[in-house]
Image: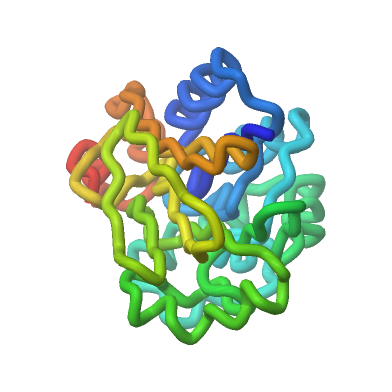
């Protein structure tokens, strides 16, 4: 099976459309989403509706949880807080209920998918030291791969090293090794590359492919401005930070 793995769309309709168009042109069996469909950007209803219409399996992200009032935005910085409250007020009833229905994890034959850390969507996993306490989760799930989002930065974490992945880079996962894999962010990359990021996990070939693709950033930024959201959210898109 070939899975397209998307994460952290954050209501960026322009990035999402470009990414899904690219995925549709590839030989992919299924698309899965690691959460944070909403937050920060200005098209939460449109992005939720596309995911729903395409029946894309999706886990609950921390911004999703705040948007549908499962959680409160404790610890959000002022900009994230402003966007979260705007999103909560902007979402229609159907999308709010859909967000509330999302699971904390998705289990597949060869891997498990979560948003942040296993069992805690709000925890960031940036380094191997961050990953170590969660290795037992893979044993519990009886698999060797955990897909993660939340940091907005692509990366592959293994017991034999931490690997950065460039666009169109294919990484051989080998046999018997355990990995935590982050495909990066569709809607708000933070690795100094403003292009939208996603991944392809091929469970037959046991390969992960990182994909980057340009999208109309200024159009997405202008939507943020028109919605009255903080200017910083518009400016950061072009910086990839």
Q: Is residue 212 above or below residue 208?
A: above
Quarter location, residue 106: bottom right
Who's the residue at 31% across and 24% down the image?
Answer: 214
Residue lying farthest top? 25
- Quadrant including the N terminus: top right
Residue 82, quarter of picture: bottom left
Residue 134 vs residue 204: left or right? left
Residue extending farthest to the front is 175
Camera-nearest residue between 144 and 9: 144
Residue at 33% across / 34% down in the picture? 169
Using the image, determine if residue 107 lies above or below residue 199. Answer: below
- Residue 110, x across and y down, in percent: 69, 53
Vertical placement of residue 45 versus 71, above or below: above
Question: Who's the residue at 69% across and 50% down the image?
Answer: 58
Question: Residue 137, relative to residue 133: is it above or below?
Answer: above
Closer-to-camera residue (200/224): 200
Asked whether residue 45 is in view, the answer is no
Q: Position of residue 94 (x, y in %)?
A: 81, 46
Relative to 218, 33 lies left or right:
right
For residue 55, say whether it is visible.
yes
Q: Quadrant of residue 147?
A: bottom right
176 or 68: which is nearer to us? 176
User: Residue drawn at (47%, 77%), measured in percent from left and top?
Assistant: 123
């Amino acid at each position: 099976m070939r899975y397209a793995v998307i994460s952290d769309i954050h209501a960026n309709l322009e990035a999402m459309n470009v990414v899904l168009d690219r995925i549709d042109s590839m030989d992919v069996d299924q698309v899965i989403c690691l959460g944070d469909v909403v937050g920060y950007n200005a098209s939460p209803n449109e992005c939720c509706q596309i995911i729903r219409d395409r029946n894309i399996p999706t886990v609950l992200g921390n911004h999703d949880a705040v948007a549908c009032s499962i959680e409160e935005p404790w610890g959000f910085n002022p900009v994230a807080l402003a966007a979260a409250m705007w999103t909560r007020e902007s979402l229609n009833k159907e999308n709010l209920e859909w967000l509330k229905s999302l699971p904390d994890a998705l289990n597949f034959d060869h891997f498990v998918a979560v948003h942040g850390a296993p069992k805690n969507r709000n925890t960031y996993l940036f380094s191997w030291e961050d990953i170590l306490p969660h290795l037992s989760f893979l044993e519990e799930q009886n698999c060797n791969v955990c897909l993660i989002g939340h940091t907005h930065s692509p990366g592959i974490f293994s017991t034999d090293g931490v690997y950065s992945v460039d666009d169109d880079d294919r990484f051989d996962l080998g046999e018997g090794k355990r990995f935590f894999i982050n495909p990066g962010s569709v809607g708000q990359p933070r690795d100094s590359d403003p292009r939208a990021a996603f991944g392809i996990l091929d469970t037959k070939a046991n390969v992960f492919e990182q994909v980057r693709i340009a999208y109309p950033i200024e159009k997405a930024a202008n939507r943020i401005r028109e919605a009255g959201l903080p200017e910083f959210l518009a400016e950061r898109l072009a910086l990839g930070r």
